Image (cartoon, coloured by chain):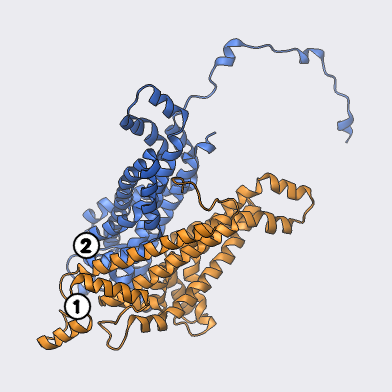
Chain colours: A orange, B blue
Amino acid sequence: MAIYIVKRFFMMIATILIIATLTFFLMHSIPGSPFDEERTSNPTIQANLEKFYKLDQPTHVQYVHYLKSIATFDFGPSIKKPNESVNKLLARGFPISFELGMVTILVAVISGITLGTFAALRHNGIIDYAAMAFAVIGISVPNFVLATVLIQQVAVNWNLLPPATWSSPLHMILPTLALATGPTAIIARLTRSSMLEVLTQDYMKMARAKGLSPMRIVLRHALRNALMPIVTIMGTMLAGILTGTFVIEKIFAIPGMGKYFVESINNRDYPVIMGSTVFYSSFLVFMLFLVDIVYGFLDPRIKLHRKEGDA
Amino acid sequence: MVSHQQKVQVPDEWFKPIGKDAEKAESVVRPSLSYWKDAWRRLRKNKLAMGGLVFLIILTLFAIFAPILSPHNIETTQYANQNLAPSSKHWFGTDDKGWDVFTRTWHGARVSLFVGVAAALIDFFIGIIYGGISGYKGGRTDTVMMRIIEILYGLPHLLVVILLMVIMGPSLTTIIVALTITGWVGMARIVRGQVLQIKNYEFVTASKSFGARTPRIIRKNLLPNTMGPIIVQMTLTVPSAIFAEAFLSFIGLGIQAPVASWGVMANDALPVILSGHWWRLFFPAFFISMTMFAFNVLGDGMQDALDPKLRG
């Protein structure tokens, strides 16, 4: 186990390094200086600006400096917003995005597993068909479409819930709903198919023969084994939810990191794009790392240092 | 209860052995079906998947012909026709530039289908070559190739795509390039897994013992038998590519007007959603959802139809 964690840890570092390097060189391949469109016709100001952002030095020096600043979690200044740095934006926006993401994950996991379990227990029954119809629709409707429909109907036409921002639990309902429907649908489908497989196993018959209560059989014996595939997709799901927050925050005017990120894309604020990409990627890669380790602990059957070549 | 206890007379001749009929024992009861015919037969029974297929065929036909046949011009702005509600002249209404939403929707269908299919095809070719080599060679080659894949798999795809789009500038080519740079990894993993499994089967050994060379084995033995999961993966790549395109358009990295894409249309409609121009959001959103739905149910149906374990 220790060897596995160390190995996974180094792979995580390698991935982050690749992302950072890729980001750096991609940003440098853009022709022209970031100050070209500003009206800084004065060459002294131009030179000073370039010096301040270390743009006057050769690329490899900039690269080393860049890696150093990433290692110390300093993602640099914003070019388009004076007196703002990526760190400041992150400190302000990320907690909100994180909250949105976590609430979404929680809602998606709980409702998805419940839905999938009931569908499997009532296989080919009405609940099963209803749950799976919901799941296919949930996977097919993009979250930004759902979000706009929710605002239009629930907030504007029926006037039930506030249409935007993130200031109270009531405000959180619509964004969470819009963002959680897709992941809920995926989890529900996965839980259902994996439950159906588990329910036919011999140890389920055994549990029933022992006279255990149905509740105990489902919770302790079936669900625990059926949940393994869900842990595996948690990583990709997190990535989806995180990028999902970009559009949801834009639509609901939530002042999270996603909103700043989309803004920075729209006015081509390269340091902010670069900084947030690296930050978000590192965060996701770290989450994947945690998921893998949790998986290793949960499933005693996977051999953690597998033979070379059959990863 | 009474009938249950009635005595039934059973004549002895009912118990005579029928005897073996040598000819009947050898006869084939069902016509022999190839793998593909059998899969098609099972897919046809799946009403939802067939519905998806029919929808996609109609969608493709409309995407090809509707913009050609439409009398409306979507190149120059026509402020006289701004934001008209759906009517017999403009079936899906018009947008803020006076463009006919019906015509634009089918232009958008072209873009979405093209992005989806192109991404799936490119993934397919890269994935087959990379995964095929990795799985067939095995050993150290496989280990190295799989390490690379593992690292790439850890990259957050949509973020990389966003980054590439920012650098290369939004265009149709850029979207496809960005999507395939990250997308082929999943396909390569599937192909490799399949090849790894199949290359040890007896019929491959038999083929080798007859002196078949590697290209022939890959072409004749390995590829046809890996096609099932690969086709399913391709069918499911299309909706995710369509979603990615819509998503990128929606955060402002889409292709530029006057070329329409469903994501761009939805994004343009967002600010005016409260002013009651529902048709501007409804039609692109409806077609994005329906297309993704159709591809998803078709993919699910093919998964069941192509699974040899379910072959009855």
User: Disc 2 versus disc 1: distance between alpha carbons?
Assistant: 51 Å
Give me the chain letter of mark 2: B
The x and y percentages for residue A277 are: 34, 71
The residue type indicated by label 2 comes to His
Secondary structure of the residue carrying numbered label 2: loop
Crowding near pointer 2: few (<14 within 10 Å), some, many (20+)? Answer: some
The percent coordinates of residue B302 (x first, y second) are 45, 43
- Along the line of sight, the residue nearer the viewer: B265 or B127: B127
Q: Which residue is mark 2?
A: B72
Q: Nearer the viewer, residue A26 or A251?
A: A26
Above/below status of A73 relative to B47: below
Residue highlighted by disc 1:
A55
Camera sees residue A278: yes
Mark 2 and mark 1 residues within 8 Å of each other at the beta carbon: no
Q: Quadrant of residue B166?
A: bottom left
Q: Is residue A33 above or below residue A200?
A: below
- Where is residue A278? Give x, y as percent: 35, 70
